[in-house]
Image (spheres, grey):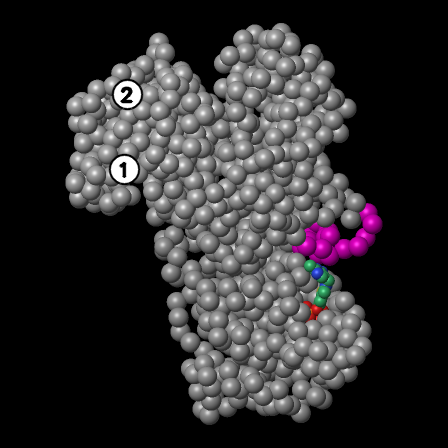
Amino acid sequence: MVKQANDYNTTIRPTWCPGCGNFGIWAAIKNVLASKNWEGHNYVIVYGVGCSGNMADFIGGYGLHSLHGRSLPNAEGIKLGNHNLPVICVAGDGDTYGEAGNHLIHAARANHDITLIVHDNRIYGLTTGQASPTSEHGFKAKSTPNGLIEYPVNGLALAISEGATFVAQGFAGELQHLTEVIKKAVDHKGFSIVNVFQPCVTWNKLDTFAYFKEHTYKLEEDKHDRHSKIKAIELTLDRERLPLGVLYEEERPAYHEQEASLQEGTLISRKDYSDSVTELFKDFR
Amino acid sequence: MSKIDFTWKIGGEAGFGIASAGLIFAKTLNRLNYYVYGYLEYPSLIRGGHNVYEVHVSGEPVYSQERQVDLLVCLNTETFNLHKNELKKDAIIIYDPLKTQVEESANYKLYAVEVSKIVKELGGLPVMENNLFVGISLALLQADKEAIFAVVSDIFTDKGEAVISLNEKIIEAGYDFVTAHPFSFSQKIEKLGEKNSYVMTGNEAISLGAIAADCRLYASYPMTPASSILHILAGYSNTSKMVVKHVGDEIEAINLLVGASFSGVRCMTGTSGGGFALMNEGFGLAGVTESAMVLVISQRPGPATGLPTWTGQADLQFVIHAAQDEFPRIVLAPGDAEEAYNLTQEAFNLADKYQTPVFVLSDKYLSEGLYYLQKENLQKFPINRGKLIPNEEIKNQTNFLRYAVTKDGISPRSVAGQENGEYLANSYEHDERGFATEDAIVVKNQKDKRQQKSLNYLDNDFVGPSFYGNKEAELTIISWGSTKAPVLEAMKNLGDKVNFMHFHHVYPLNSQLLSKILSQTKKSLLLEGNGTGQFGLLLREQTGWQSTHLMLKYDGRPFYPEEIQAKIKEILGN
Ligand SMILES: Cc1ncc(C[n+]2csc(CCOP(=O)(O)OP(=O)(O)O)c2C)c(N)n1
Ligand code: SF4
Ligand SMILES: [Mg+2]
């Protein structure tokens, strides 16, 4: 039977605010799962903590609702345990660029075969509206009444410079395009990151659907060189014109493909080598 | 029966193969079927700084280092100055007069060898002088030359024939020198009857234990004194097929394990207190998601960076109370390398059975101390994966409940990718399927379920302390973890007046059982490597019992048998 997006719903209805950008990302992810015709045991989704991560209750199958900022290392562990399983991380912008900075760097340079979807609402949604690492300089919010002093993190440039092999951007208001981008990211072998503009209708009155509609544009495949790091990073530098689509792509063996101990199959399915200890004792005479 | 019992000590600047010399010396004696204990002291430096390695050798079981030395090898003057007052009567000091200045004294004998000159003449490098000293020492002890050659050839096998034969030549020169300059020494090494033992450090034993337990993933960030586990397991990974990953930080390590457990593979991490401090939140995630994992915490003293290369037992209350709220955890504290090997395997079985994190609590003393292990005492635990649900069983289920409330508190466990086993592992409090909940009843049920695992463990898998010595003794020494070694050594001279209760399953504790055991003690001496008597506080909390005497040490140094004996004499008044 061919799967439909709604087959991945659980019995729990989303608790997001009406009109929240998270609905669009939720729909796109389910579209991708359906396009693969995956059963609930054919994939794992790891969720960070935030409004974004609350999706954990709204998609069936194997899931791990992690800590704030720790979805990446959880996903790496799952992947090392069973590298045949596609693993997707759903995380917030605070989650990723705030708490998980080090994890992002190491996941990218290791090229773990994981897809990270960042719900970039430029705000801390769940904790009721503080500035996030991607909020605009000068952004006034509860924790920054005088305006944010810092400048926004350039997450995608960071990912590219640290070795991510698939770097893309989407917009929750462009469901079909977003579905395609996430699908490509999931198909990519290696570390892929998709930064998704996700308006928070409750706390962020600046970065709205209308704002992103006006400030985004779709990259045309034949006009952008996806294999140039420099060109891709250049595209991320313009905060006024925000590219949607695949910014950067590279073929490089994923971590598990290079790990010697994973060459005869997955860690969970390989045979038991515990008897090898007998031989090792010889070194201790 | 052999009366051989002596301590050999070598000291010099870091970078001159002090530890390597000690290992060759100890291994050689092990192959001649003597018992050995090796102890290394070094500062947290790569070059410079004073390093010493001492090997306590005996024809009878030997458990720890001792304060007084029989043979002191000085690679530099500093060694002589620092250790000349730690000598037994008639001790020998072996030194190179071209490098080391010594003083004459009636308290010891001097044996001068121009080691640097001999090594140079043989075409060796200064870093090979250590092996000439080892050769001279063993020659003075009249130990069989072939035994040391065999050890050298095994140790340097990766370095190739040339290195082996040069080192053999150097050692041979040591034997020749002693033949030409005979010197009588009270201890004479003769090969003893085969006793089937190994020598290894606590960290090596933990590593082999993990391999024997079918651990498939080790994720760690280097931190002394746990780092060598990472090196050992990585070195053996081509044989064990373990994935050994040096990760970006400790937060990554523990969270990687939560993921690996979700995939169903046995996994372990190792660190010291500082690294574990970073792991705390992830440790809580492991608790609430009921993940199975083993954490090796090798203690060193001090908050923050502390004393990286010294020992202590001050993290017991830390690991017991780590992470917010309450959830089960089990803490095992091996007393020596044999126990480290066995308990590490047991830790994996307990982690799977109770679906919760299990600690192997070590310290610098155990992790880097060199112990003998008797082959017959090494167990191979059958691997017990607990309630991992087999495919045939899960096949017919329609609504698998990963966190089903059960009588024993343990729920059936599926692994990622298993058909029909889908669930959500959740850092939020959750219902039986794993979905987040704030329902008062469900919250209480889940917490009770997890807590039930602790009670279940206490009824079925808790192991009380091991007893040593005379049941009717006047005084009972109580200790836990690595302090076992110096206590057993001290007891050799304490006769029937003292017995010893050693704890290796240190948390949680079965209060009923312990109340009974502890109430039978007369005088007691609680001995711990921390400043507040943390295990004593735990015993008191669990049973109300309090030790009559306390011996605490928290200067980074291990307990010495001599000081334990002195303390006991003080208590017993003779
Ligand atoms: C260690 C830790 N620190 C803080 C929090 C509180 N917290 C929960 S979500 C969140 C920020 C959410 O922002 P973001 O990651 O952008 O996700 P969003 O809600 O916007 O989707 C914070 C600070 C937490 N759960 N854990
Ligand atoms: S607070 Fe913002 S991000 Fe969270 S659900 Fe509401 S609209 Fe969405
Ligand atoms: Mg956010």
- Give, as a single range, the part of the protein colored magenta: B426-441
Viewer-closest of A274 and B573: B573
Relative horizontal placement of residue B435, taking residue B186 as reference (left or right): right
Q: Is residue B432 magenta?
A: yes
Please tell me the numbered disc located at residue B141: 2
Q: Residue furthest right?
A: B440
Front-most of residues B523 and A139: B523
Q: Is residue B377 visible?
A: no
Q: Residue at x 67, y 89 (%)?
A: A213
Q: Quick one: label 1 or label 2, which is nearer the N terminus?
A: 1
Please tell me which residue is depicted at 73% across the width and 43% down the height of the picture.
B326
Residue B77: quarter of image? top left
Q: Are marks 1 and 2 on the same chain?
A: yes
- Cβ–Cβ below 8 Å for labels 1 and 2? no
Q: Quadrant of the C terminus of chain B?
A: top right
Q: How many residues crowd around disc 1 within 10 Å: few (fewer than 14), some, or many (20 or more)? A: few
Q: Nearer the viewer, residue B91 or B216?
A: B91
- Secondary structure mainly formed by the magenta segment: loop
In the drawing, what numbered circle is on residue B98?
A: 1
